[in-house]
Amino acid sequence: MYIRDIGKKIGAGRTAVIYEYGQDKIVKLFKVGFPSAAVQQEYQIGKLVSSMAVPAPQVGSLVKLDGQEGIVYQKISGFTLLEQLIRSFEKAATYIEKFVQLHVKIHSLQSSCLPDGRQKLVDKIASQKLLQDSIKEQLQAGLSDFPAVNSLCHGDYHPDNIILHNGQLIVIDWVDAYYGYPLLDVARTYLLISTPYVQVHVDTGTISEMQKVLAGKYLEEYYSLRPFSREDFNRALKIVAAARLAENVPNEQEWLLSIIHDRSPSPISVFSIKG
């Protein structure tokens, strides 16, 4: 089969393009040169996650079209949670409550068959040329202060990776899933909600205010269900900020460095946390 024989293009990212694939499926077609091992890993992660008690797309087969490798997924129709928030921000509290409840549910699941999240973070921090070796070593050592647990973590949990489908939140894009300590996943989500790299077509001032509200509500709601200390969160935030640097996201470098070097106020000052 050739690319011209499948459905219309419905999305694109840095590594892949998404096409319709029959009536109820899509195919994620990876760009030429994308490592086969990475495609296989995403496929295996997807199969594992879809077999767990979490709302995620079912994974079909591996395919090859015009020499490009791809993965077939169940098609999930609906608006993303980010789109819903932009359309109906007055319902933000309700949406964030559901968003957090689902995140907590994900973290309640266990799996040691996924990549080791701690090792992923160590490797990303080690690859950084913007940080002094002493800072990298301090951040990597900080990981050992967190318990070694096998909690399921999404690794890229944010409102644009959630689809509202028939009244249910469905989590997509599990390629970065790992097992590890949930607070690191929480800190990553806080970063993703707060990022200055915004791709939606909304007034910059408006989206910035929305982000502040959403990030604060997210932390407050998560804390109400699974409390954590101020010290642990700040440590986790610095670690995931250093790892995020490796992704070279536009407009984020100075912001991330300010978090790592304590030049930004602690985000958890917006509500009361003991410790």
Image (spheres, rainbow, N blue to C red):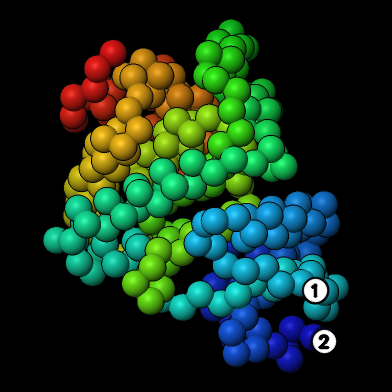
Depth check: 93 or 31 in front? 93
Q: Amino acid at mark 2?
A: Met
Q: Residue at x 79, y 69 (%)?
A: 62
Q: Is residue 192 above or below residue 73?
A: above
Q: Locate residue 66 relative to residue 265 in the image: left or right.
A: right
Q: Quadrant of the N terminus?
A: bottom right
Task: Say which element carries label 2.
Answer: loop
What residue sits 24% from the left and 17% below the top? 274
Q: Nearer the viewer, mark 2 or mark 1?
A: 1
On screen, residue 248 above or below 45 = above
Instruction: Identify the image quadrant of residue 104.
Output: top left
Name the quadrant containing residue 160: bottom left
Sequence-first disc among 2 and 1: 2
Binning the other alpha carbons within 10 Å of mark 1 as few (below 14), some (14 to 19) or many (20 upward) gives: some
Task: Tell me the residue that label 2 is attached to.
Answer: 1
Please indicate whether residue 247 sits to the left or right of residue 208 in the image.
Answer: right
Residue identified by numbered label 1 = 63
Residue 238 visible to an observer of this rendering: yes
Crowding at dot 2, Cα within 10 Å, few <14 / some 14-19 / many 20+, comes out as few
Residue 181 in the image, given as x and y percentages of width and height? 53, 30
Contact, CB < 8 Å: mark 2 with mark 1?
Answer: yes
Q: Position of residue 2 (x, y in %)?
A: 79, 86
Which residue appears at 59% of the width and 40% of the height?
Answer: 110
Question: In the rendered view, would you say 31 is above or below 177?
Answer: below
Q: Which amino acid lies under the numbered mark 1 shown in the image of this protein?
A: Val
Q: Residue furthest top?
A: 134
Q: What's the residue at 60%, 90% (across, down)?
A: 23
Residue 194: where, in percent of width, then height?
34, 42
Q: Quadrant of the C terminus?
A: top left
Give the structural element (helix, strand or loop) at label 1: strand
Give the distance between the C-alpha atoms of the residues marked 2 and 1, in whole angstroms: 9 Å
Quadrant of the image occupied by residue 207: bottom left
